[in-house]
Image (cartoon, rainbow, N blue to C red):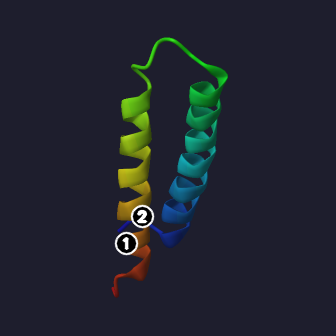
Amino acid sequence: MIPKWFYKFLIAMCVISLCIIGYKIADGEQDRSFIWLGFLFLMAIWYALRQLRSKD
């Protein structure tokens, strides 16, 4: 079983990564291939929150 702190760590890392992606978009980065990573990070946050809310 994965400990609860791992999901909290996952959420924190995803939020930081989304901030970096948002900065790159606002900065006018021409190569947009990194944007799909934002979707993956949002899905990871959703999964982590679901695991934190589920009862063992």
Amino acid of disc 1 = Gln
Residue wearing tag 2: 48
Name above or below for residue 55 compared with residue 27: below
Q: Do labels 2 and 1 touch, CB within 8 Å? A: yes
For residue 51, which numbered disc appears in the image?
A: 1
The spot of residue 46 in percent (x, y) is: 38, 62
Q: CA distance from mark 2 to mark 1?
A: 5 Å
Q: Quadrant of residue 51?
A: bottom left
Element assignment for label 2: helix
Q: Residue at x 36, y 43 (%)?
A: 40
Amino acid of disc 2 = Ala
- Left or right side of 12 for 4: left
Q: Residue at x 51, y 60 (%)?
A: 6
Bin the neighbour count of mark 1 within 10 Å (Cα to Cα): few under 14, some 14-19, many 20 and up: some
Name above or below for residue 28 compared with residue 19: above
- Image quarter of the C terminus: bottom left
The spot of residue 12 in percent (x, y) is: 60, 55
